[in-house]
Amino acid sequence: MILVAGSANLDFVVRVPHIAAPGETVLGRDFQTFCGGKGANQAVACARAGGAATHLLVALGDDTFGASLGATLQRANVQLHSVLVPECATGMAFISVADDAQNAITVAPGANAGLRACHLPALDGFTHLLMQLEIPLDTVLAYARAAHAQGLQVVLNAAPARPLPEELLTHVDLLIVNEAELACAVPSGGDVELGLALVKVPCVVVTLGAQGCRARCGTEWHEVPGLAVKAVDSTAAGDTFCGVLVAALAAGKTLAQAMHRANAAAALACTRLGAQASIPTLAQVDTFLLSHDAAANP
């Protein structure tokens, strides 16, 4: 059973021809709202695309956005541990999605900033704790320390990018980052292999977008190539990867096998618009993997 502790946001998404440069105004097209937030996205990915029993610890505002987000998560078979933060808005994200599927995201944390160490539920029965950095860093550290002490596998997706305290890393079993987040975590000069070697955690996985992902676990190295799809929106692709990776590990898959499944789920998420709305089902991931593996091994 997996516990995800993290953020929930309502995403305001506008399609644009390209991401605006500083000082530039871009005329957008379609506008939609979606349920998002890294914590909520990863919990949905664990449950829907990974098929894992998943709980989510999250802080919501006392508003209609919070109620809507909570209902959506429950429909995704995510068991909620929700903290109501009075007189505070639910978290929001403002997202531009370009025609080349790249995105630019600004987050207003709102109630997410109210998640505290005292809100952590009893950890009995959980095997993995998955967190991100859209909640207060001291809260992440407190949760990691408590989970590590009780023998859970602590997984940190170090996003958004920021320097990571050494004390936090001592309580992390698996770190998941993209290239920018890896460069922020360790002074590697942008060298992915050097960064993987320097991170002071037992296992680290770096996602490389369309190029797939690489990992170092102890002295073992793994590389999984990307899967070609027609991308329309990369929002939540990284979150989908994280959720499915942890779900696969919790199901007993090897790290290489889990990376392969996570890669496939993230690729499928890029073919659809939105955050949680883009996350595929377990059956869709299985079908995609079967077709890909059959094509690769005729």
Image: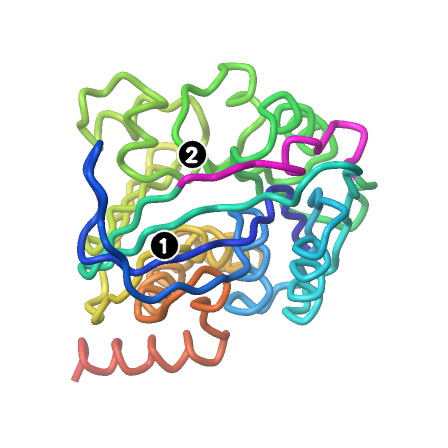
Residue range in magenta is 106-120
User: Residue 38 placed where, x, y %?
Assistant: 51, 47
Q: In the rendered structure, are the residues bearing label 1 and label 2 in contact, judged by CB atoms less than 8 Å apart?
A: no
State the image quarter where residue 232 is shown.
Answer: bottom left
**Residue under label 2:** 160
Q: Which amino acid does label 1 sit on?
A: Ala
User: Residue 138 placed where, x, y %?
Assistant: 63, 21
Q: Nearer the viewer, residue 45 or 246?
A: 45
Q: Is residue 223 left or right of residue 149?
A: left
**Residue 246 colored in magenta in the image:** no
Q: Nearer the viewer, residue 152 or 268?
A: 268
Which residue: 43% across, 47% down? 94
**Residue under label 1:** 256
Q: Nearer the viewer, residue 35 or 3?
A: 35
Q: How crowded is mark 2: few (under 14 residues within 10 Å), some or many (20 or more)?
A: few
Which residue: 45% across, 72% down? 280
Question: In which quadrant is the C terminus drawn?
Answer: bottom left
Which residue: 24% across, 52% down? 102
User: Residue 161 placed where, x, y %?
Assistant: 39, 30
Q: Residues within 10 Å of mark 1 (few under 14, many from 20)?
A: some
Secondary structure under tag 1 reads helix
Q: Which color scheme did the rendering employ for the protein?
A: rainbow
Looking at the image, residue 202 lies above or below residue 9 = above
**Residue 109 colored in magenta in the image:** yes
Secondary structure under tag 2 reads loop
Looking at the image, residue 196 lies above or below residue 100 = above
Q: For marks 1 and 2, give the one nearer the viewer.
A: 2
